[in-house]
Every structure is written in C-alpha cells, then in structure tokens.
Image (cartoon, grey):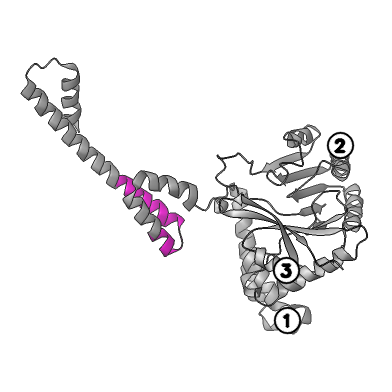
C-alpha cells in the first residue's frame, strides 16, 4: 500500500522527464490499485454475507441473496437493504421494554405448561378452550386472565355511545391506537373529550397511522393535540419514494381506559353512517380452510344489514384476497396498482348481495 501511494504521488507531482520511468510508475500504481480493490471486494462480500446470515432464518432465502451479492456486490447490496431486509421486525426497544417483553414471554411459556396440568384439565372453562388458549399464547403472547366480562357491540351508534361514556368516566389514563381517525363531527367530539380529560390531569396517549389518516387529518394534527396536553404520536410517517416500509402499517383499533375497560375491533373513528366498511379478516394458518372466514364475513354482513341507514357494504383488499370476496358476492369497483406497496394493488369492492 505504501509503495502505491508513494509511486502515485511521485507520478502526479514530480516532473519526471523520462517517459519510460513514468510508464513504470503508472504500471506499479495500477497494479497496487487492482490488488487493493480485490481485497476490498472480498472483504465487502464477506461482511455482507455475514449480515445476511445474521438477518435471515430461512437458508434458501439467505443462499439466494448471497449469490446475488457475490455476482453484483454493490447493486446487490443496495437491493438487499431495500427489499431483502424485514424492516417490520426491526423494532427499537429500550432496556425496560426488553425486560417487560422477556417477562411476558416467560409468563406465556409458564401458562402453556400450566393449562396442561391435571389440576386444571377438569375445569371446563380451561379444557373446553385449551386449543384456543394455547394458540393465543404461542402466537401473540396473549396471557390468560380471569374475572373478565366481554360485551359485543353490534353497530357504530352503540359502539360510539359506549366509547363516549367510558371516555368521560376516565380517571387515570386513556390509551388509544387507530388506523383511521377522521376530522369530522365525531372525530372532533372525541378530540374535545380527550382535551378536556388531559386538562383534568388524566394521562392521554394517542397513536394513529400516517398512511391511514393521510387524507382524513391535517398534517399537523399530532402537534395540535400535543399542544393541548395529549401525548400524540404518528406511526411510520409516509414519505413518497423514500419510504422503505410503506406496508408496515398500524391497523390496530384499540382504546384502553384506566387499565380496566377496553374497546377493540373493526371500527375506526369516523362518522359515516350509510356505508358499512368491512375490515380485513385475518385467521391463523392453523384455522384456515375450515370456512371460518366465510362464516365470520357472513356474520358481519348480516349485522350490517340489520342496521338502519346502511345502504352499501364495501371492502378494500388486494389481489391476494380478491377471489375470496368475489365468491361471497362482492363486485370489483376499482383497482389501483401498487396502492398498499409495490406489487400489492388496491381492490375496491362492493357487496352485491343486497335483497
């Protein structure tokens, strides 16, 4: 390396008048440069392969990316960073959050062991639902709790009446997480309640999805709420072209009040009363192929049909589930290419089975 740099400097700055000497110095410089680039290339490939092996759990995918990187080191590396890494799983936690997650994981493993204990198997509330309990513990770390009450809210009017009542009764905390919040009459009413509760000293936290609220809320909505004492965050700010995690969206619909009362399900905060919107039906792979999705969708259509004022039922899906909804009587109205993400198109459909 030292020989190359010295030779290059002499050639560049010293007035060597002998043409043969200049040619020798140039030959030495390029030879060393080629050696340097070769070593750099090898090190780059080795480091990149190590990163891929660390990131990937599936050997076939890891091997495919290794071949691409070996043949096209720079271009392949850029493609891997953009398309190969699972950004959805790259989450940043502080130490306390990591400790909490470890505790939840340990408790879920303990409960999986305990629900199979002979002393619990004779209890019908455990034995009759053991498969479902085990599934929830394994997939979502959803811990089994007791002494709970569950109530099904069948329509938007009933749901929002209960939400208003529960929010006004909040004494300690309000935690909300939604995919869509609209700046309409209902949205502003909920915001006014949250602002009033924050003024009373209630801890109010709100997170909403930037993509879901792109056309329903002002860009500065989170700043407006923060100025009124609400801890407001926007999930995964959408930046066109620059957004590498476009499809990493927050579709949750949750509201937890005082750690005791919770609302969850397919209702976003919007005041549209004539259109019933079907949220995506998602089933665990172990429960697919049993017509559960068909029955669930049928139940939701029946409930929407029983409501007064509902004139149409719509669903926004992709080409992956388009065939399922078409079999259930939905008619395709619009297709938007790459709407959800590159290669995932929007299929806007409307139910055609009204009698």
Say the numbered circle drawn on residue 225: none
Quarter of the figure with residue 311: bottom right
**Residue 123 place in picture, x, y as percent:** 77, 82
Q: Name the residue under label 1.
A: 127
Rounded to the nearest angstrom, the CA distance separating label 3 from label 2 is 35 Å
* On-image quarter of the C terminus: bottom right
- Relative to 299, say whether 23 is above or below: above
Q: What element carries label 2?
A: helix
Sequence-wise, the earlier of marks 1 and 3 is: 1
Disc 1 crowd rating (10 Å Cα; few below 14, some 14-19, many 20+) is some
Residue on which the image places disc 3: 144
Which residue is denoted by mark 2 in the rendering?
199
Kindly indicate the quadrant of the structure image that contains residue 332.
bottom right
Q: Is residue 340 magenta?
A: no
Residue 127 percent across, percent down from the top left: 73, 81
Viewer-proximal residue among 125 and 282: 282
State which region is magenta.
43-63
Q: Is residue 194 left or right of residue 5?
A: right
Q: Distance between the residues labelled 1 and 3?
A: 13 Å
Please, what is the dominant secondary structure of the magenta stretch? helix
Residue ID at (59%, 48%)? 93
Residue ID at (73%, 72%): 294
């Amino acid at each position: 390396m030292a020989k190359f740099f010295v030779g290059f400097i002499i050639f560049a700055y010293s007035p060597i008048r002998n043409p043969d000497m200049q040619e020798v110095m140039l030959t030495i410089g390029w030879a060393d440069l080629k050696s340097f680039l070769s070593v750099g290339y090898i090190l780059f490939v080795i480091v990149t392969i190590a990163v891929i092996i660390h990131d990937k759990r599936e050997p076939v995918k890891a091997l495919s990316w290794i071949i691409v990187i070996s043949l096209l080191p720079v271009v392949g590396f850029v493609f891997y960073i953009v398309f190969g890494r699972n950004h959805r799983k790259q989450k940043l936690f502080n130490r306390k959050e990591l400790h909490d997650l470890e505790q939840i994981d340990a408790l879920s493993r303990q409960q999986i062991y305990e629900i199979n204990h002979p002393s619990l198997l004779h209890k019908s509330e455990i034995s009759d639902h053991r498969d479902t309990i085990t599934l929830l513990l394994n997939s979502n770390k959803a811990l089994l709790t007791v002494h709970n009450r569950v109530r099904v809210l069948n329509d938007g009017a009933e749901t929002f009446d209960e939400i208003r009542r529960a929010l006004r009764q909040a004494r300690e905390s309000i935690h909300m997480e939604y995919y869509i919040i609209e700046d309409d009459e209902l949205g502003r009413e909920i915001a006014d309640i949250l602002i009033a509760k924050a003024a009373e000293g209630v801890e109010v936290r709100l997170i909403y999805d930037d993509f879901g609220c792109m056309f329903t809320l002002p860009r500065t909505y989170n700043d407006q709420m923060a100025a009124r004492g609400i801890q407001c965050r926007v999930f995964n700010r959408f930046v066109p072209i620059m957004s590498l995690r476009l499809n990493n969206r927050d579709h949750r619909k949750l509201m937890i009040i005082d750690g005791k009362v919770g609302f969850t399900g397919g209702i976003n905060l919007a005041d549209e009363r004539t259109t019933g919107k079907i949220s995506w039906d998602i089933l665990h792979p172990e429960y697919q192929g049993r017509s559960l999705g068909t029955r669930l969708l049928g139940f939701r259509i029946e409930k929407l049909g029983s409501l007064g004022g509902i004139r149409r039922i719509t669903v926004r899906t992709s080409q992956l589930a388009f065939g399922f909804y078409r079999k259930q009587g939905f008619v395709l109205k619009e297709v938007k290419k790459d709407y959800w993400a590159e290669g995932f198109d929007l299929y806007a459909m409307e139910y055609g089975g009204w009698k």
